[in-house]
Image (tube, rainbow, N blue to C red):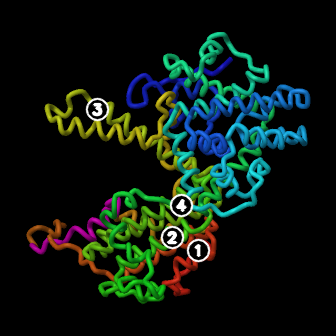
Amino acid sequence: MAKQQHVEKSGPMAGHVRRGRLFVPEFAATVQLTPNDWFRDDVPDYLWPLMIAESQGNSSLIRFARWQGAVQADLKDLVPAKALAAGLDGRLTSLDRLVALHDGAADVMRERAVEYYLLTDEISKALSTYPERPAAWLTERELASPDQDDVDLIAASLFGVLRDGHREALIKCLLIWSAVQAGTFTSDQHTIDLLKNYPNDEATRPQADTTVRASWGAMKGLLQHEDEKYFDDSIRWARVFWGMNSMTTMCRRKRELEGPSDGLDEESEAATVEDEEGERPANGPAATSIEDVDPHGEHDFRQTAMDLMSSYVEAIETSPQQLYDQERQEVHTGLVSRAAREVIAVLGAPDLWCLEHGAHIGRMLVETRIQLAWMAAQDPSIYPAYQDYGAGKAKLYARILEDLPEGWHGSNEAIKESVEEGVAEFDRLSHTGSVFDVRSVDTRSTFASGKTLRDMAAEVGLSDLYRNSFQLQSGIVHGEWWSIEAHGMERCLNVMHRAHLIPSLSLSSGDDKTLARSWLSGLYTIIRMSLSILGTKEESVDAAFSWLEGEGDEPEDDAR
């Protein structure tokens, strides 16, 4: 007998099944869900028809369906109908599967593709820029480096299917059209009626698009159920595709289109370009070691922190990136970026260079170092788990805002609008599906199933760092009495008041250069540690940090 599940009836988590401190949406707790990232896993396999649709329009995919029929007519007595239908479903890997069944199939498919104007020079050339590509025989071209025209066509093809749901449905319908023409397609009468005049019947097209996309997912699931390795070649190709894209094109930022904005974008621009002699510009750091940086000179602490972050980004983005399993790199760069932004901000305000006002900086640097070291020792699934934990918290915050008592803001429309904007933003950050909500909320204290930072530090040999640095600075951040007494109170000198403590009206003296330099060194430590864990190409790291040659700033082995 199935165990009865407890569903929350009220509060922010109403409608969720409670499992300890984990709250799961009722739908997700009831059905077995298999996540599928079609853009990551499948789109590279459909690169050929995607480029046809982009360069010749959506209607060209009808010509692709006619090509399917012509090839099937040529091979119908040579290949079983079911295998023929599967081999012509629009995937590049399926073409190779078909060729493995009959040697002459490659010539037939290529000749028919030329006849139906599906293999233009533009498309063949772009396809030939990828090594280890499936159906390499399709283009009869040697591997070549992509030029700007190739990049533009491929990028437009990817963007086109992302923004056009009808094009996505047409691409996914290639599987159905192939099966229909091979005589192997079966479905209910409603679906058959919908697809009979698809895509020409504009009245039923939106419903048909939805049906096609849903059917495609169901058919993919069935193929994986029958053979769990069915799409292994497709996944291998997707890894090659996204990995090659990281080597042939650079990351792009919003500021490249809108111009530089405040902070790191504008002030560190000089740190990311070289002058005509290949040297760092005059306002870049001249020192070869962090210990040599002058805190208030031309090459000050804040500028050096900006340059360290810029060099970190440069090393990452000029090295091959893991764009298929991107979570590890995203978590690393996110944590390092957070640390760098905090350090850069506080180094611009010398009054904060003291333990009372700057303890949160040292604490955050230690926390980041321990987290990076601990996650590196776990299964790679810890990185998406870290992201999911945060996305769940964003969902929780959205539901808490929604659960505010009616009229609590009175007649203040500005506050009401601000709350609504907050809910919308937290919903976006929770990545909750627009159709089915499958985002769980984990209310345990950490992303590591509640494991404390102290436990993480012990597991990776950083207990001393935790005890000697993190604990003390946490006491200050959390307002432990000893810290309040030391920094914010003083003895009353009126003997008639029994020497009680009174609030001090003097601020802690900042401008502690030793403390500020330790933050800079701590930032550099986690930067080099992250690059090491990520396996960033050594040449990229050396080039990015060529301006900083000090050997004494390398992170310790136990932190790697």
* Dot 1 and dot 2 residues touching (CB under 8 Å): yes
Residue 375 in percent (x, y) is at 59, 58
Which residue type carries mark 4? His
Graded by Cα atoms within 10 Å as few (under 14), some (14 to 19) or many (20 or more), the crowding at tag 3 reads few
Q: Mark 3 or 1 closer to N-term?
A: 3
Report helix, strand or loop for mark 2: helix
Residue depth check, mark 3 versus mark 2: number of the one nearer the observer: 2
Q: Mark 4 or 1 closer to N-term?
A: 4
Query: Real-space Cα distance between discs 4 and 1?
Result: 17 Å
Specify the quadrant of the image occupied by residue 371. Answer: bottom right
The answer to whether 431 appears left or right of 41 in the picture is: left
The answer to whether 74 appears left or right of 208 in the picture is: right
Residue 541 in percent (x, y) is at 57, 75
Residue at position x 43%, y 26% from top? 14
Q: Which residue is mark 3?
A: 404
First to last magenta residue range:
477-494
Mark carried by residue 314 = 2
Residue at position x 76%, y 34% from top? 88
Graded by Cα atoms within 10 Å as few (under 14), some (14 to 19) or many (20 or more), the crowding at tag 2 reads some
Residue depth check, mark 4 versus mark 2: number of the one nearer the observer: 2
Query: Real-space Cα distance between discs 4 and 2?
Result: 14 Å
Which residue type carries mark 1? Ser
* Dot 4 and dot 2 residues touching (CB under 8 Å): no
Is residue 379 in sight in this rendering?
no
Graded by Cα atoms within 10 Å as few (under 14), some (14 to 19) or many (20 or more), the crowding at tag 4 reads many
Q: Mark 1 or 2 closer to N-term?
A: 2
Mark carried by residue 540 = 1
